Amino acid sequence: MEVNLSFEGPIYRPPSEADSLLIQATVGCPHNKCTFCMVYKRGPRYRARPVSEICADIDEASDRYGTLVRSIFFPAGNTIAMPTKDLAAICRYCGMKFPNLQRMTVYGSSQYIVQKGLSDMKLLREAGLSRIHVGLESG
């Protein structure tokens, strides 16, 4: 799906997210120390985008594709590292803006998932996050 959304740095998505709407919530990778990774080394430093900017992108995509969106992927190196309250807020907002939404997905390394803890992970699930892509390289 093409929309004029705000993207910064490289954007990669797993093949299973080929039909997903891409909304960038974070930029770069917070770890950025993997010797094999050439994706984020030259890109911008990790940061979470302001929720208001993300919601503006969600609004634009909703105006264009509202009922067509069934899955959303939040790309960048490790979106699960985003503050839980902010990630939960954008997940809930997507749930309101896309009536046929069935799945929301992020990338997340095991290190950052563990840091979240069970209560934060439950909060994210309740907000609508349904899948975390964890690469073998992060195990």
Image (cartoon, grey):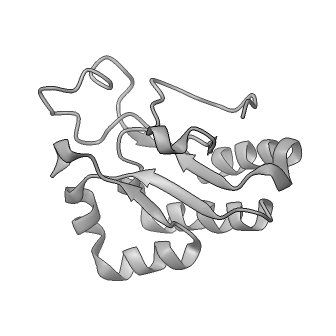
User: Quick one: which residue is furthest to the left in this view?
Assistant: 35
* Residue 63 pos. (x, y %): 88, 46
User: Quick one: which residue is furthest to the top in this view?
Assistant: 42
Label total for image: 0
Q: Is 74 left or right of 102, judged from the image as shown? A: left
Q: Is 46 left or right of 97, judged from the image as shown? A: left
Depicted 94 relative to depicted 31: above or below: below
Q: Which residue corresponds to the image point at 72% horizontal and 34% vertical from the top-left?
A: 1
* Residue 35 pos. (x, y %): 11, 27
* Residue 3 pos. (x, y %): 75, 31
- Name the one closer to the observer, 55 or 101: 101
Q: Is 75 left or right of 115, judged from the image as shown? A: right
- Name the one closer to the observer, 23 or 18: 18
**Residue 106 appears anywhere in the view:** yes
- Name the one closer to the observer, 130 or 115: 130
Q: Which residue corresponds to the image point at 26% horizontal and 46% vertical from the top-left?
A: 135
Q: Is 38 left or right of 56, judged from the image as shown? A: left
Q: Which residue corresponds to the image point at 35% horizontal and 30% vertical from the top-left?
A: 45
**Residue 26 appears anywhere in the view:** no
* Residue 11 pos. (x, y %): 48, 29
Q: Which residue corresponds to the image point at 74% horizontal and 51% vertical from the top-left?
A: 69
Depicted 111 relative to depicted 8: above or below: below
User: Quick one: which residue is furthest to the right in this view?
Assistant: 63
**Residue 2, quarter of picture:** top right
Depicted 71 relative to depicted 9: above or below: below
**Residue 116, quarter of picture:** bottom left
